[in-house]
Amino acid sequence: MNIENAKAQMRKGVLELCILSLIKETPAYVPDLMERLQKSQLAVVEGTLYPLLTRLKNSGVLTYKWQESKSGPPRKYYELTTQGKLALTELEEGWRQLVESVNITLNQQPS
């Protein structure tokens, strides 16, 4: 078994939840998202993040707006749509249920 691969797959599985959670209060710029994920020890590369953001935008969960920058070209800021806020609520509940189920399983004593 490739432990590192299994851990990476677990992180990828919760990445959408984490990204939506980071964006829920304030629109976010991709480098800011990457920094915040890195601080949470969920470092991702642009090659992973941009396709995920595009998929979430195409599914109606995210939208974006361009904002002028004082230091270069305009920046794209992502924010949740109404559908995205509902999706985040459902993902959060699903996460809580999953964590509870995994904890129960991990703490079961052999019969």
Image (cartoon, rainbow, N blue to C red):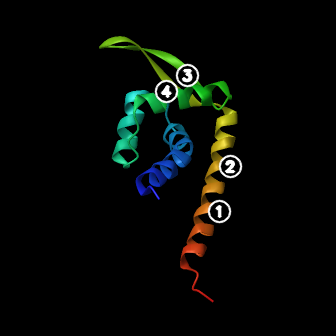
Alpha carbon separation for disc pair 4 and 3:
13 Å
Where is residue 83 shown, x and y percent of the image? Answer: 70, 35
Kindly check if marks 4 and 2 are in contact, taking CB atoms under 8 A apart as contact.
no
First along the sequence among labels 1 and 3: 3
First along the sequence among labels 4 and 2: 4
Where is residue 69 shown, x and y percent of the image? Answer: 36, 14
Q: Which residue is mark 3?
A: 64
Q: Which mark is in front, 4 or 1?
A: 4
Q: Nearer the viewer, residue 50 or 30?
A: 50
Q: In terms of secondary structure, where does tag 3 sit?
A: strand
Q: Which mark is in front, 4 or 3?
A: 4
Q: Does 12 sit above or below residue 28?
A: below
- Report the residue that reaches farthest toward the left: 71
In percent of the image, x 40 and y 42: which residue is there? 37
Q: Does 106 sit above or below residue 40?
A: below
Q: Which mark is in front, 1 or 3?
A: 1
In percent of the image, x 68 and y 49: which residue is there? 90
Q: Amino acid at mark 2?
A: Glu
Alpha carbon separation for disc pair 4 and 1:
28 Å
Q: Which residue is mark 2?
A: 90
Where is residue 22 shown, x and y percent of the image? Answer: 48, 41
Q: Which residue is mark 4?
A: 50
Q: Classify residue 82 as left or right of residue 10.
A: right
Q: Does 66 sit above or below residue 99?
A: above
Where is residue 73 shown, x and y percent of the image? Answer: 37, 10
- Name the mark on residue 97: 1
Alpha carbon separation for disc pair 4 and 2:
23 Å
Q: Nearer the viewer, residue 1 or 22?
A: 1
